Image (cartoon, rainbow, N blue to C red):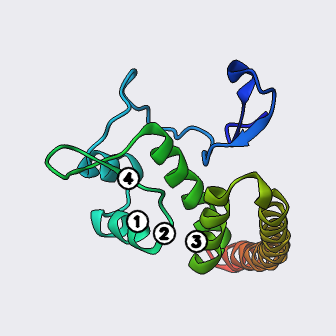
């Protein structure tokens, strides 16, 4: 079971549910804390406050709780979701697809097949990009080797 899924066995249902989470981030959050200001989230994620508000506005973020004064209060679950969105961004997934995926998560279990298909398609795209990058790396390695050999040959030909 991944962090993306949690068993509801504790609740007695025995089913798996998508909790909109990603693997934990490398930056440790304060233990026992589950309530963060936007500036704390900026520090944890590296995203700007503008980006966080935009994510909320376009529907990429679920509803964000507010304090009694109206300030956004993010939870650990929100931070996990942002980490997952960050990974989706790295895949090159268009924002519109990420928003659609987020909508499907909110729609519930009936969208598992569609979510699977989106992620599987994205995975294929990532694998194709990795293959392209490996080919590119091989070309670079060849050129680097060529220039290293040529540099050694020139150095050995110079009079001392």
Placement of 128 over or under 84, stated as above or below: below
Mark 1 and mark 2: span between their CA atoms?
Answer: 5 Å
Residue at image coords 38%, 52%: 64
Residue at image coords 77%, 61%: 111
Q: Secondary structure at mark 2?
A: loop
Q: Residues within 10 Å of mark 1 (few under 14, many from 20)?
A: some
Mark 3 and mark 1: span between their CA atoms?
Answer: 10 Å
Q: Residues within 10 Å of mark 3 (few under 14, many from 20)?
A: some
* Residue that mark 2 sits on: 59
* Residue that mark 4 sits on: 64
Mark 4 and mark 3: span between their CA atoms?
Answer: 16 Å
Q: Are marks 4 and 1 in contact (CB under 8 Å)?
A: yes
Q: Which badge, 4 or 1, comes first in the chain's sequence?
A: 1
Locate residue 50, reporting x and y percent: 29, 69
Placement of 6 over or under 119, stated as above or below: above
Q: Name the quadrant of the N terminus.
A: top right
Outermost residue toward the left in this view: 69
Which sits in the foreground, 131 or 103?
Answer: 103
* Residue that mark 3 sits on: 99
* Residue that mark 1 sits on: 56
Q: Are marks 3 and 1 in contact (CB under 8 Å)?
A: no
Q: Secondary structure at mark 4?
A: loop
Q: Are marks 3 and 2 in contact (CB under 8 Å)?
A: yes
Q: Name the quadrant of the C terminus.
A: bottom right
Locate residue 125, reporting x and y percent: 80, 74
């Amino acid at each position: 079971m991944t962090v993306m899924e949690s068993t509801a066995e504790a609740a007695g249902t025995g089913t798996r549910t998508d909790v909109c989470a990603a693997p934990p981030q490398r930056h440790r959050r304060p233990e026992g804390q589950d309530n963060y200001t936007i500036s704390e989230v900026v520090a944890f994620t590296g995203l700007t406050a503008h980006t966080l508000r935009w994510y909320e506005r376009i529907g990429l973020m679920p509803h964000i709780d507010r304090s009694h004064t109206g300030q956004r209060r993010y939870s650990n679950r929100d931070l996990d979701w942002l980490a997952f969105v960050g990974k989706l961004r790295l895949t090159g997934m268009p924002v519109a697809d990420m928003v659609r995926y987020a909508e499907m998560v909110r729609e519930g279990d009936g969208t598992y097949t569609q979510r699977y298909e989106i992620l599987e398609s994205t995975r294929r795209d990532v694998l194709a990009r990795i293959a392209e990058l490996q080919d590119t790396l091989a070309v670079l390695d060849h050129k680097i080797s060529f220039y290293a050999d040529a540099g050694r040959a020139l150095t050995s030909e110079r009079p001392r």
